[in-house]
Amino acid sequence: MPIQQCSRALHSISAAGLWTAGDKIVGHRLVPTPAWLAQTWQELLDVAGLKRQPQLVTVLSAHGSVAMFLPGLFQANLVAIGLTDVRDLILKARAAGRLQDIPDWVAPFSEERVYSDVELSRAFARAILAHEIGHGILHARRAAKGGVAEEGDADRLAGQLEELLGVESEIGKLVFELVGCAEQFCSHPAPHVRVAAYHEGRQIEIRARRSREAQDAQARWRAVFAS
């Protein structure tokens, strides 16, 4: 979202409890949305089927959260994602030896490029954004429970959305492992719990797809016998 088009976004963010001034959310500097991120966002919205689609706001850093779902009242719901937070998540994975086949980060922050491998950035951001859209789905269904339970439900929906997109699951599992909370008192589930919820979501969608395919096959056979 271009900065000059962020007035509604800023109003909603302010209503959500984050002070704003000009093009800044205190500690959250708004930046232009890279083309690869806008495309990833639109792909997720296309399969999510939300009537009230949230707006994407890109910030330099979300400071403690890679992304945030900000429910609006009369304004649109918002999802804010931090570009450097996506970068740091990938660097964390690489430092842990989880991305041995991925080239080193060679590009500084810019509007259109965060990593030398844009597809890697897309894959990490897609899993994060799928989770935030999951919150949007829960709010639309009036099923948002709040707390750790809602986070788990959003992880499960993220798995369903990524399965609908037909993308591989390994990066998604890694992302939810990395963002899981390993502390004693947490607002988000533990790493293994988040990975399990994401995997469960993918399995739910796989079963639903197989059921639809079986029903379609039965309908075709009935049409053959009826003729």
Image (cartoon, rainbow, N blue to C red):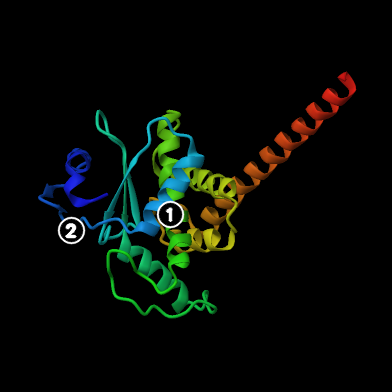
Observer able to see residue 189: yes
Along the line of sight, the residue nearer the viewer: 60 or 177: 60
Q: Residue, x 79% and y 26% (percent of image)?
A: 219
Q: Which residue in the rendered view is the most extreme toward the right?
A: 225
Q: Which residue in the rendered view is the most extreme toward the left?
A: 21
Q: Quadrant of residue 71?
A: top left
Along the line of sight, the residue nearer the viewer: 188 or 28: 28
Q: Measured along the vertical axis of the image, is residue 139 above or below residue 152?
A: above
Q: Residue, x 25% and y 57% (percent of image)?
A: 32
Q: Measured along the vertical axis of the image, is residue 57 above or below residue 184?
A: above
Q: Earlier in the sequence, mark 1 or mark 2?
A: 2
- For badge 1, the amino acid type reads Ile
Observer able to see residue 150: no
Q: Which residue in the rendered view is the most extreme toward the front?
A: 227
Q: Position of residue 30 (x, y in %)?
A: 21, 55
Q: Position of residue 54 (x, y in %)?
A: 35, 39
Q: Position of residue 105 (x, y in %)?
A: 39, 78
- Image quadrant holding the C terminus, namely top right
Q: Residues within 10 Å of mark 2 (few under 14, many from 20)?
A: some
Q: Kindly report the distance in space between the C-alpha atoms of the residues bearing marks 1 and 2.
A: 20 Å
| Disc 1 target residue | 128
Q: Which mark is residue 49?
A: none
Under circle 2, the secondary element is loop
Q: Measured along the vertical axis of the image, is residue 62 above or below residue 160?
A: below
Q: Which mark is residue 27?
A: 2
Q: How many numbered marks have been drawn onto this rendered protein structure?
A: 2
Q: Is residue 49 left or right of residue 72?
A: right
Q: Measured along the vertical axis of the image, is residue 18 above or below residue 227?
A: below
- For badge 2, the amino acid type reads Gly
